[in-house]
Image (cartoon, coloured by chain):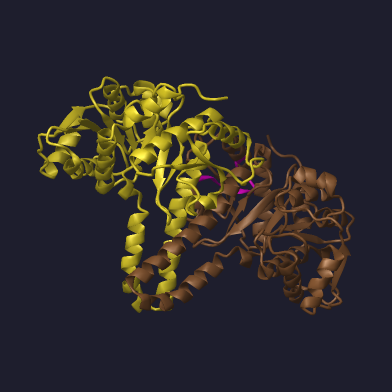
Chain colours: A yellow, B brown
């Protein structure tokens, strides 16, 4: 197994990506490899700094770097020798089994789509995140790959997410919902209504209908599909609200009694850890013909290490083959 | 001043609405009135049950009731003598200064729009909610009146919300953001980009650009505008996530040490109260020619009482006149 990691991607690259690669080594078999894509000198210097000299780590030199703020379209056109592009090219050539980047999300998603391509039957891949909730994990898709999807694409997300939830999250019969603003079928918007109709008609899916924002945390569904704009707002809002609430709680505890603070700290740490994106190891780009993991821009080494774990897990479970089988069995979407 | 209250609207009506009216009396002057719109016998029975016999409370008989699940369009067409419709009709005739309902939101918003009408210069009213955050209140508009607004309408929301934040929340120079999925102007979708351009061109507004979900809780803006679909998802998600997090925290505290629970309870209660919709007294329907307050379907008497407080406050501050003045002064939107 060969995992390609964008050593130049993310707010703390290459420092944290190279350290993350080292952390990820323990999830690899003896003959597996992590290939660091990036500017050789820069990556090598980092490896030397931490004394990383494992035969399972290799550097693939990529002279160009796509920065976080660049326009994806422009960047892909102009920087063909950037790590993000080379990762996708090598995955397409079957040199890599999985690709990971914490860099420019738009550029990485576009590179995967253009170079690696989608599984037959899938028109547009979606980014899925696994959200921890009191009632168990919920997969939300799409959180930003496509802000104006077609109903058919939400239906595709549902099918790909079901494969993911079954195989990786071990949810036997995942319940699928469409994120909307009312439980009645008449509410929502055109996209929601048409996507709901497509999913409902597919008897292999356990459709629970429209789910509202609050239902995501209420245990009503295991998978929630939506357009990439709504999904991204949900993702960022959840981060912000959780942070804000914890800040409020800590401030209130301090006001109540300073002596309570150390008693509450381990509780905060535990909950925080469970809700921490770094623990989840990135978001799978579902629908691509290779395992592709998008990491948070703020990923530290632990997040990168966990992304490697998640990638290894998907390759081991033959996740791509399962998705391909699902879309091959019923290649036509009902409409 | 005359406040019209939909006695039949909400999950716990008429019990809680009538009790809420009693709670709201203390915000009224000696010659002010709360008029209970609903089925006379039913409302009267509730008044008798709690011994409510104040000269400032009157019943306006409305023989029909629009239920929570009904289609707004159908309901308005068929039930012209329902409390929701009569409230709007009487406000349009200047018999009422403010209208309040915890009933069918869609029907109430549509009735207000059709019967009372919008302030000159406003094409579509929006529902605004005031969200409590660690850094102070943030007004989010629209949270469900219009799921497919035009850019011009987001710009109108921004202007109306500025009036609201100044007058009611006492924020001198409110910062306005457009909810999007990236800070750069190029990101987001067409609506976000075009609305942003309109708001930016208006030098009377303090525009901070696009704000992401997390920024709402990060103190980046005082007002955030968006389409009604996104806004409603944000509203419901916030409710669900806050509830879910508190559940998790309480469970973790119990696990840590049962003895900690009573010490932590007052803190939870305090934060919960501050985040409780019932404390906020409903969401103003901004842009209507009368004060109109939409309450949560689950409103209890406290929520209804607070809605009366908020309505009185808006009438006292001549909120509608201020909005009309703002849109009269610059009736044309720039485009």
In the image, taking residue B151 as reference, residue B52 lies left or right, namely: right
Locate residue B321: give its quadrant: bottom right
| Residue A300 lies in the magenta-colored region | no
- Whether residue A38 is visible here, answered yes or no, is no
Q: Nearer the viewer, residue A147 or A212?
A: A212
Locate residue A50: give its quadrant: top left
In the image, taking residue A257 as reference, residue B276 lies left or right, namely: right
Work out which quarter of the rendered image holds the C terminus of chain B and state it.
Answer: top right
Work out which quarter of the rendered image holds the N terminus of chain B and state it.
Answer: bottom right
Q: Position of residue B39 (x, y in %)?
A: 84, 62
Q: Nearer the viewer, residue B92 or B19?
A: B19
Residue positioned 72% across, 48% down in the render:
B106
Q: Position of residue B310 (x, y in %)?
A: 70, 65
Residue positioned 9% across, 38% down in the render:
A53
Residue positioned 45% across, 27% down in the render:
A124
Direction front: furthest residue: A203
Which stretch did the figure color magenta?
B200-211
Q: Position of residue B114 (x, y in %)?
A: 82, 46
Q: Is residue A30 above or below residue A138?
A: above
Q: Is residue A283 above or below residue B14?
A: above
């Amino acid at each position: 197994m060969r995992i390609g990691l964008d050593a130049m991607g993310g707010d703390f690259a290459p420092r944290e990506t190279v350290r993350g690669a080292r952390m990820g080594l323990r999830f690899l078999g003896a003959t597996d490899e992590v290939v660091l894509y990036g500017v050789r000198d820069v990556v090598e210097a980092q490896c030397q700094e931490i004394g990383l000299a494992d035969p399972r780590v290799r550097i693939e030199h990529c002279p160009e770097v796509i920065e976080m703020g660049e326009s994806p379209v422009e960047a892909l056109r102009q920087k063909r020798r950037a790590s993000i592009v080379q990762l996708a090219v090598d995955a397409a050539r079957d040199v890599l089994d999985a690709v990971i980047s914490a860099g420019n999300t738009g550029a990485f998603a576009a590179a995967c789509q253009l170079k690696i391509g989608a599984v037959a039957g899938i028109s547009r891949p979606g980014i899925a995140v696994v959200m921890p909730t009191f009632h168990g994990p919920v997969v939300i898709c799409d959180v930003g790959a496509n802000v104006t999807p077609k109903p058919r694409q939400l239906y595709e997300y549902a099918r790909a997410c079901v494969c993911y939830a079954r195989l990786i999250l071990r949810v036997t019969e995942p319940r699928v919902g469409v994120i909307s603003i009312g439980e009645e079928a008449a509410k929502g918007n055109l996209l929601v209504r048409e996507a709901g109709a497509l999913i409902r008609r597919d008897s292999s899916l356990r459709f629970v209908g429209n789910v509202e924002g609050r239902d995501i945390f209420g245990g009503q569904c295991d998978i929630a599909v939506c357009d990439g704009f709504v999904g991204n707002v949900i993702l960022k809002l959840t981060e912000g609200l959780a942070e804000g609430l914890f800040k409020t709680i800590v401030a209130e505890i301090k006001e109540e009694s300073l002596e309570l603070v150390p008693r509450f700290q381990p509780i905060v740490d535990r909950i925080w850890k469970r809700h921490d994106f770094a623990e989840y190891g990135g978001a799978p780009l579902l629908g691509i013909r290779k395992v592709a993991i998008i990491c948070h821009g703020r990923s530290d080494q632990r997040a990168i290490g966990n992304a490697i774990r998640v990638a290894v897990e998907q390759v081991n479970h033959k996740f791509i083959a399962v998705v391909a089988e699902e879309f091959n069995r019923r290649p036509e979407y009902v409409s």
